Amino acid sequence: QVQLVESGGGLVQPGGSLMLSCAHSGGLPSSAVMGWFRRAPEKEREFVAAIRWSTGDTYYADSAKGRFTISRDSAKSFMYLQMNNLKPEDTAVYYCAMSGYLDERFRPYDFHYWGQGTQVTVSS
């Protein structure tokens, strides 16, 4: 059973940076795709970024391109989301998730394991 635990959320001023971490346990299939999603108040959960675990190929939502960077450590135990130049509209609960296959539509439906989420608030 895959378990995912996020950390690193918090309160940051506009223009600031945060790094989120996701620790996984339980083993990942070779086809795994790990992703970050977020849910803002009164909005649906949306895709932010993903990484193909075996190759390190990365994928980003338009809102994240140029500001966010997804990565994993060399031991493949942690996934990260470095968020720079944060904006108030980035305020949301951020979730780490795992899919067993790559579908570049990155629908929440395709991700079967989820962390509990970590709150990111961007405010002055």
Image (spheres, rainbow, N blue to C red):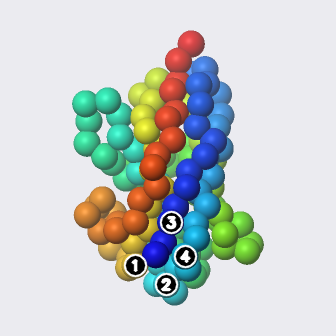
Please tell me how crowded label 4 is: few (under 14), some (14-19), or many (20+) other residues with Cα within 10 Å.
few
Residue 105 visible within the image: no
Q: Amino acid at mark 2?
A: Pro
Q: Left of 7 or right of it: where is 52?
A: left
Residue 7 in sight from this viewpoint: yes
CB within 8 Å, label 2 to label 1: yes
Q: From the top left corner, tell me how far across and down residue 117 is, in percent.
A: 46, 46
Q: Nearer the viewer, residue 56 or 91?
A: 91
User: Are discs 2 and 4 less than 8 Å apart at CB?
Assistant: no
Provide residue 85's location: percent of width, then percent of height.
Answer: 60, 32
Label 3, label 1: how far apart the Cα atoms are = 14 Å
Mark 3 residue element: strand
Counting residues from the start of the chain, the first of labels 3 and 1 encountered is 3
Identify the residue at image location x=71%, y=66%.
73
Q: CA distance from mark 2 to mark 4?
A: 10 Å
Q: Are marks 3 and 4 in contact (CB under 8 Å)?
A: yes
The residue that label 2 is drawn on is 29
How far apart in space, not on screen, are marks 1 and 4 (Cα)? 13 Å
